[in-house]
Image (cartoon, rainbow, N blue to C red):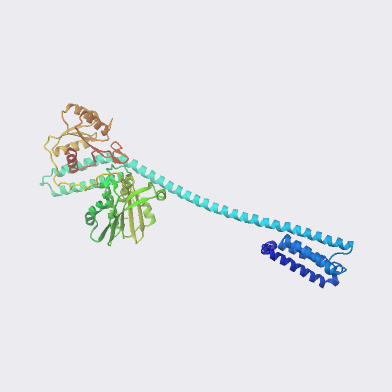
Amino acid sequence: MNLLLATDPIRLRPWLGYATAVVLVTVSLVCRAWLGLYVGGINFLLFYPAILLASLLGRWGPGVLATALSAFLAQYFFVDPVYSVLPETTDQWAALIGFLCNGLIIVALMERVTAAHAQQMVLQKQLEDAAKTLESKVERRTAQLRSEMDERVAAQEKVRQLQKMESIGQLTGGVAHDFNNMLAIIIGSLDMATRRLTGSEDPRLAKSIQNAKEGAQRAATLTARLLAFSRQQPLKPETVDGNKLVGGMSELLRRTIGEHIQIETVLAGGLWKAHADIGQLENAIINLCINARDAMPGGGKLTIETANAELDDRYARLHDEVKPGQYVMLSITDTGTGMSKEVIERAFDPFYTTKGAGKGTGLGLSQVYGYIKQTGGHIKIYSEIDRGTTVKIYLPRHHGEADVAAPGDALETALPLVDGTRIVLVVEDEEQVRHMTVDALRELGYTVVQASTPKEALQQIELLPHIDLLFTDIVLPETNGRQLADIVRQKRPDVKVLFTTGYTRNAIVHNGVLDHGVNLLPKPFTIDQLALKLKDVLG
């Protein structure tokens, strides 16, 4: 052990240093007296260790005390004549002065040693503090690097997700228009065939037509879900009261889910208004409730809850495409089988499903995800195996004053027919789609004029004295349907316009929202949907 370090407690207590000096000199005095017969005239030599140790243990004060006390005791007891305070001869004076000088030199040297030791302790303390500070900085920087690495990994994951969605969006947009045109021909023709059945045919014919219609409708739904996931479906947002929406859907959900599952609604008081496409929001809730039902094959409890929520900056940084602010939260909780972390990470991927073959396309959650993101909201899954799952939807709060969307009227059982006085100009570049649309409109009692290009449509406008409605595809050669409609309105301000398309390409949809005052009938559509839409537009 370091002697200087071990004796630091004595140096830190001055009185203890002086007491130690007295004790050491006394011990030296006893030793000199006991060894007197052996050391002869060596009177001062045995006192040097006391001075050395006193200076070491107490620094310069106890060292000087030990030097003076040793000189006095040696002179008094051991220099002839004994018991004399001062020397009597020159040699005795020289010996005394030499002892004092040597003692003070020892004190000075030991003072330098102890001072250097004290400085070393200070430097060591500073070094330890610096090391601790450096270690703390290293830990903080390591934590920052780890956080930056996590953020980089998250950012890379976001980029991959965005690239995946962009790729799917490009693929979907590329095929949606042509695919929906083909489906429009199929569904429209099957509708016409169904309406023209007389009842005298083989009953299996009607069944075959119905099966074909159901298959075509499933294909149309598949395309719509892909468009929803890639955030390219046209939305018509309205002010929504979440409590009224959930309350109005309760009976529908009970019929859809079944009696073996208990449904409970927890509605928040003072719930903010949201801004969303009410039809798509209802579809999202139904999709989530059906997933919850499938997770509880033996029955269970389904809880639908509304609440006001605020997502802060920290939450927004940790989640993809989330803006901090106020939201209206809708949560759907089940007591089912739950999901693992790996399943949660892939839950929103299109065509990913944990259900058995034929029990799901894997597009339900991806459609909900795309719709919520397109709305500017957020969706989050919380789940534990065998404990259940909670899916929370966050919709942006609507701050403006607006009438809350009311449930639509029930669909009429009979198609609204007209007497042939209404004239519709159909503009469609796909020949088969145009013929099918013309046949459907004539079946409904409309007088129809057709054109395959915008140029032909404008020629018809010049020739015809009166047109009630322009029914035009958006994607047309040379110019799009929106531009054609603007030209027609300049010539005939009283003409109503109804757009149709399988893929909007931002002609009438911007930032995912249908332009104000625009009427759209997406392809593929049935004759029933066409009839009701025309009635709505023409009044």
- The N terminus, quarter of image: bottom right
> At x 34% / y 40%, what residue is drawn?
170
State which quadrant residue 59 falls in.
Answer: bottom right
Q: Which quarter of the rendered picture does the C terminus lie within? A: top left
Seen in the picture, residue 109 relative to 313 is either above or below; the reply is: below
Is 504 situated above or below 207? above
Residue 214 lies left or right of residue 61; in this view the side is left
Farthest residue toward the front? Answer: 85
Question: Would residue 85 be found to the left or right of residue 214 on screen?
Answer: right
Q: Quadrant of residue 82?
A: bottom right
Q: Residue at x 13, y 48 (%)?
A: 202
Up/down of 291 relative to 511, above or below = below
**Nearer to me, 365 or 329:** 329
User: What is the x, y in percent for residue 325?
Assistant: 36, 48
Q: Position of residue 314 (x, y in %)?
A: 42, 50
Q: Position of residue 241 (x, y in %)?
A: 26, 49
